[in-house]
Amino acid sequence: MRGDEAVEYFVVGHDSRLDPIGRNILFSDRVLGGFATAEEYEVAFVREGRKLEYRSVIELPVFLISEEVREILGQYESNLSYKTVLVTDQATYAQAHFCLIDVPQVDCISRTHSVIERGIIKQVVLDEGKINGHRMFWAAELPFPGLIVRLDVAEALLRHSMYGLSIRRILTRAGEV
C-alpha cells in the first residue's frame, strides 16, 4: 500500500437481521468490565429458559468474537491478546467459546465531517490522520458497538462463512488540521 492511497475501514459487528443473544447470557462483572478486568478464562451461563444460539459476534452487553474470528484477526495482528469466555447452556450441555480481545482505542472520529446533532453522532466519519496505521481498533465515542478493521482484515473475514457477522464500510477523511 502506497503512503498516498486512501485506506478503507469497516465496522465488524453483529448481523442486525438476527436476534442478539447477549441478553440470553449471564456474564460475570469481570467480563462485563471488558478485557482489563476479565480473567484469562471465564465461564458464562445461558439464562434459564433461554437457549444458546451460535453467532460469530456478540455485541452487547460486552463485545465478544468467536474463536474462528479471533484466529483470522490474529493473522493480521500477531500480538493480539485475548481472553476466553466459555458460554455454557446447562440445560443442553452445549458450549461455545468466545474471546475478549485487546485492541487499542483510538480517538479518531472526525468532529468536522461527522454528522452530530444535539451531541449525538448520527453519521460517523473517521479521521485517517489519527488512526496511525492500526489494522484493527475501537473508535472512541463510537455511538454503536463494533470493531473497526482495515480493508485487508475485512476481506479475510468475508472469505469465511461467519454466521451472525456484519461488515459495514465506514467513511474516512484525510487528516484534519
Image: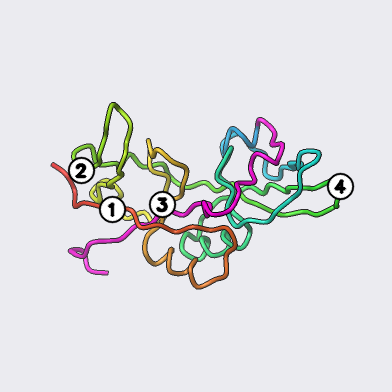
Q: CA distance from mark 3 to mark 1?
A: 11 Å
Q: CA distance from mark 4 to mark 1?
A: 44 Å
* Label 3 vs label 4, nearer the camera: 4
Local SS, label 4: loop
Residue 163, image x, y percentages: 60, 62
Q: CA distance from mark 1 to mark 2?
A: 10 Å
Q: CA distance from mark 2 to mark 3?
A: 18 Å
Give the residue number, with chain letter if any, for mark 2: 113
Q: Earlier in the sequence, mark 2 or mark 4?
A: 4
Q: Earlier in the sequence, mark 3 or mark 1?
A: 3
Give the residue number, with chain letter if any, for mark 1: 171
Q: Which residues are magenta?
A: 1-29
Give the residue number, with chain letter if any, for mark 4: 91
Label 2 amino acid? His
Question: Residue 148 has which mark?
Answer: 3
Q: Earlier in the sequence, mark 4 or mark 1?
A: 4
Q: Earlier in the sequence, mark 2 or mark 3?
A: 2
Label 1 amino acid? Leu
* Label 2 vs label 3, nearer the camera: 2
Residue 104, image x, y percentages: 43, 45
Q: Are marks 3 and 1 in contact (CB under 8 Å)?
A: no
